[in-house]
Amino acid sequence: MKKSTDADLAMSKSAVKISSDLLNNPLCEQDAAFLDMVTAFDTAMRRMDSFNQEKVNQIQRTVMEPLKKFSSVFPSLNMAVKRREQTLQDYRRLQNKVEKYEEKERSGPVLAKLHQAREELRPVKDDFEAKNQQLLDEMPKFYMSRIDFFKPSFEALIRAQVCFYSELRSIFSQLTAQIDRPELSDEQREKENEGTISEMRALSIVGDD
């Protein structure tokens, strides 16, 4: 998401840079019609950049920050899993110790050691069962909550995109109305564009494909 918003901002900033450079071109001082066209283009690019920045700010607040907050939960869950695993190892170690004494002949010293081993096992067993039950209760809830958590962010992302592209359509519609030449047909525009592209390719600063 961050790469996408960074690319969006870079795109609109580049468009503003292009329009600004065109506006500073000496040709604008020589041709009033060209100046009007470039001025309209520059205004449109700056409006686009402004709306783009607003869109990115909204996505930051409603999508990126909530997702970052959600992801911050994972380290604590991983730590809880590690604590459970460590307790399980202690539990198994003491359980094996108890079983070892239970298999031996029941003499006085063995019974004393068996009693001591059982006493050591009891709190560790209780601790493991508590940690295990906590994870059994919380992990499914956390997994199921992801949809409810993400849904508002996805809705906000869609609204931000719809709003931005609606504004973009309005901006370019207005720009088209300002700089378009209605007397030209689509075929004439296409030929004119092809001619302009051919002239650009003939420039010495343009490298061969």
Image: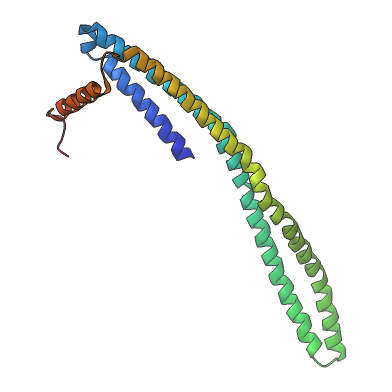
Q: How many marks?
A: 0
Give the side of residue 196 with respect to residue 160, left or right. Answer: left
Camera sees residue 137: yes
**x and y, in percent, of residue 183 in the image:** 27, 13
Camera sees residue 46: no
Give the side of residue 36 with respect to residue 114, left or right. Answer: left
Residue at left 71%, top 71%? 90
Task: Tell me the quarter of the image containing the C terminus.
Answer: top left
Q: Is residue 115 above or below residue 40?
A: below
Front residue of 46 and 110 = 46
Residue at left 63%, top 37%? 152
**x and y, in percent, of residue 63 in the image:** 57, 37
Tell me which corner region of the image, top left, top right, bottom left or bottom right, holds residue 109.
Answer: bottom right
Residue at left 62%, top 51%? 74
Farthest residue to the right: give it: 108
Give the side of residue 189 with respect to residue 3, left or right. Answer: left
Residue at left 82%, top 71%? 122
**x and y, in percent, of residue 173 in the image:** 40, 19
Tell me which corner region of the image, top left, top right, bottom left or bottom right, holds residue 124.
Answer: bottom right
